[in-house]
Amino acid sequence: MKDKKKEILDWVKVVLTALAIAFILNRFIIVNAQVPTGSMENTVMTNDRVFAFRLSYLFEEPKRGDIVVFPFPDDESENYLKRIIGLPGETVEIIDGKVYINNSEEPLKEDYLKEAPTGSYGPYQVPEDSYFMLGDNRNISLDSRYWINPYVKRDKILGKVVLRYYPSITVLK
C-alpha cells in the first residue's frame, strides 16, 4: 500500500512541476499565439501557431522588420501580430504603396510583401516611445494605417515572433 501511495505522490509531483514550468514559460518567457487572419501572409499564414520570445527586447530595442505580438491599441483584450515599420521619432509616409521613412528618396526595401501594395497614407509622426506597424499582406491588413490609436507603445510589445511551430516548424526572421 505504501508503494502505491508513493507512486501516486511521485506522479502528482511530476504533474505539478510540469504545470509550474508551463506557467512560468507562458507568463514570463514566451507568448503562444494563433494567427487568425491573412494580414501577414505569406510570412505567417492564417491559423499558423507561433511563439514570441518575451525576453527579446530585454537588452536591445525593437528593430524595423521585427514581427511582434502586442495588444491591439484600440482593444487591448485582443493580441495582434504585425511587422515593425516605423521606429520612435520617425516620419512614415506611404505613397502608391511604397513606404518612405523620414522623407527618404528611396522607398523601404520590403522583400517579404505578399503582393505589390496600393494606396497612399500619412505622413505619420511616430512618438518617441512607440512604433508604427504594418502587415505583410498590405492590401487586406488592418494595421496602423486604420487604427484609432495608430502607434504601439514600447512597453506594450509582448514579444518578438521567433518560431512558427504549426503546421510546420520555421524559424522566423
Image (cartoon, grey):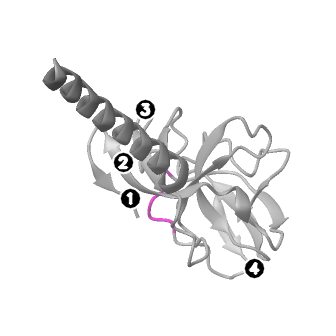
- Left or right of residue 37, residue 143 in this image: right
Q: Which residue is mark 2?
A: 164
What type is the residue that disc 4 sits on?
A: Asn
Q: Position of residue 85 (x, y in %)?
A: 63, 65
Q: Please give the residue where the numbered disc 4 appears in the rendered image.
A: 102
Do the numbered discs 1 and 2 sit on residues whose CB atoms are within 8 Å? yes
Q: Is residue 151 above or below residue 93?
A: above
Q: Which residue is mark 1?
A: 172
Instruction: Evaluate whether residue 31 shows in this view.
Output: no
Q: Amino acid at mark 3?
A: Asn
- Image point 54% across, 67% down: which residue? 65
Which region of the structure is painted magenta? Answer: 110-115
Which badge, 1 or 3, comes first in the chain's sequence? 3
Question: Which residue is denoted by mark 3 in the rendering?
Answer: 47
The answer to if 105 sits in the magenta stretch is no
Mark 2 neighbour density, 10 Å: few (under 14) some (14–19) many (20 or more): many
- Residue 146: x %, y % from top left: 77, 45
